[in-house]
Amino acid sequence: MECTLLKVVFILLVLGILNTLVHGQGTRVGFYSSTCSQAESIVKSTVTSHVNSDSSLAPGTEKTAFPNLGLRGFEVIEDAKTKLEAACPGVVSCADILSLAARDSVVLSGGLSWQVLTGRRDGRVSQASDVNNLPAPSDSVDVQKQKFAAKGLNTQDLVTLVGGHTIGTTACQFFSNRLRNFTTNGAADPSIDPSFLSQLQTLCPQNSGATNRIALDTGSQNKFDNSYYANLRNGRGILQSDQALWNDASTKTFVQRYLGLRGLLGLTFNVEFGNSMVKMSNIGVKTGVDGEIRKICSAFN
């Protein structure tokens, strides 16, 4: 699955870049102001350059694992790391680059900025089995909530961060089970809007097209906005795990609040997304002398 911004920092946890829970001790805004003053501008310019040449990269700043097959964009992180190593060798961590790039990619897609605390260090442990902690395309709401709760994130964080699906695409193979033979009588997932179902079946042929790309937020895949939630309300969520947010009462309320439905206290998606990203980025942080500063982000030193 491609382009789930919520996992930008989550993947740092499960791939071992961050893996000790100390809630951001030692991190601060502008951590590199005296040691590598151009650090944030280098990351921003690198992300901007790549996005300008391929706008689909904005939501893809994640590392590949099974739930993220087809992800692109990690080369942007490596490019930024190469430039930072040339400017300030051994100073800026990959964990910080990823967090900064996540923020910058949202802004480039029309979202609001947020302050990123920096000063993280990279982990020395990475276990492939940990990817099972990542949200999967067919996860129920209960399973999603359990995975988020295990990292100290609540139901609002879940609905907010999954809203990162407002930009980008996924492959047919990750939701084709919903299009045919989903029920015991061979019908498709009844939660899909009938007119939308026929479109998806055409875009994802039964015996081919497994790797065809489909926008996660139909009609607004390159813009960071709340239209993703409107699609859930209208039965146009692509992934089973996404549409489940509307079908489950515990998460539906938050979707409705992001849509500003009358009678509910509204939530502003852009603002809350930044808040939840800050909360997520403070999970499992290594600082001080813990961990290391990787020379390349894809391997330990």
Image (tube, rainbow, N blue to C red):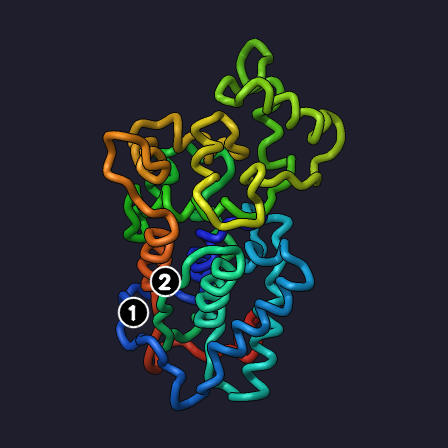
Q: Residue 204: horizontal and vertical position, in percent?
A: 69, 30
Q: Residue at x 56, y 42 (%)?
A: 220
| Quadrant for the N terminus in the image | top right
| Secondary structure under the numbered disc 2 in the rendered image | helix
The 10 Å Cα crowd at callout 1, few under 14, some 14 to 19, many 20 or more, is some
**For mark 1, what is the residue?**
24
Q: Quadrant of residue 289?
A: bottom left
Q: Residue 96: horizontal and vertical position, in percent?
A: 44, 72
Q: Quadrant of residue 297?
A: bottom right
Q: Residue 271: horizontal and vertical position, in percent?
A: 34, 54
| Secondary structure under the numbered disc 1 in the rendered image | loop
Q: Quadrant of residue 34?
A: bottom left
Q: Amino acid at mark 2?
A: Ser
Whether pointer 2 and pointer 1 mark residues with C-beta atoms closer than 8 Å, the reply is yes
Disc on res. 281: 2
Q: Residue at x 28, y 77 (%)?
A: 26
